[in-house]
Amino acid sequence: MDEQSLIKYMTTKRYKEGEYVCWDFVRDIYKDLYNIDLPEYPADEIQAEFKYELTSNIKHKKIPAGEAQEGDIIVFSLFANQHAGVMINNESFIHLPKTGVQVSDIADVGKNYVIYRMEK
């Protein structure tokens, strides 16, 4: 799916604060667009789980900075909380902060992030 279609599709979905967290949003993208069921994790455990061990049947690998592609998962710290989103190209990602669905530049998160590529 091209970048504009992905943004349009995901921003039309309705998310209510308190009912969804960023990982729910990432899971929705993977289920809806890639037909991959990601495991459920509490939001505060996302980065720790991905950094050390993903306890599921989904193969994944860390991706070096600058090599991200559409669909890769970015995990980072946001004001001392863990946060996750999905890359829409090498420089931008879509995510669900408390303000609603948003597209951000990877440069906005500094260097404290990890990017993963999921494989079926």
Image (tube, rainbow, N blue to C red):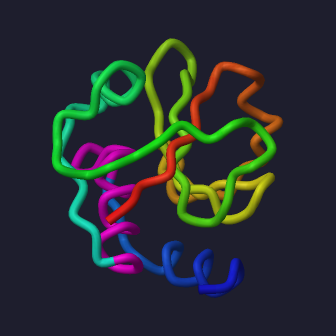
All told, the count of numbered labels is 0
Q: In the rendered view, does 42 fall on the left or right side of 21?
A: left
Closer to the camera, 13 or 51? 51
Q: Residue at point 63% right, 66% down?
A: 70
Q: Is residue 9 above or below residue 29?
A: below
* Quadrant housing residue 32: bottom left
Residues 9 and 49: in front is 49
In magenta segment, residue 30: yes
The structure residue drawn at horizontal position 39% and vertical position 56%, both measured from the top left corner, is 26
* Picture quarter with the C terminus: bottom left
Q: Is residue 39 left or right of residue 98?
A: left
Q: Main secondary structure of the magenta part?
A: helix
Q: Residue at x 67, y 85 (%)?
A: 2
**Does 33 appear above or below 38?**
below
In percent of width and height, residue 110 lies at 77, 24
Residue 103 picture location, percent across and down: 67, 58
- Find out whether residue 39 is within the magenta segment: no
Q: Quadrant of the N terminus?
A: bottom right
Task: Give the magenta-colored segment's residue range.
Answer: 17-34
Question: Can you give x and y, in whole percent of width and height, for residue 79 in the image?
Answer: 56, 17
Residue 81, percent from left and from top: 45, 19
Q: Is residue 17 above or below residue 41?
A: below
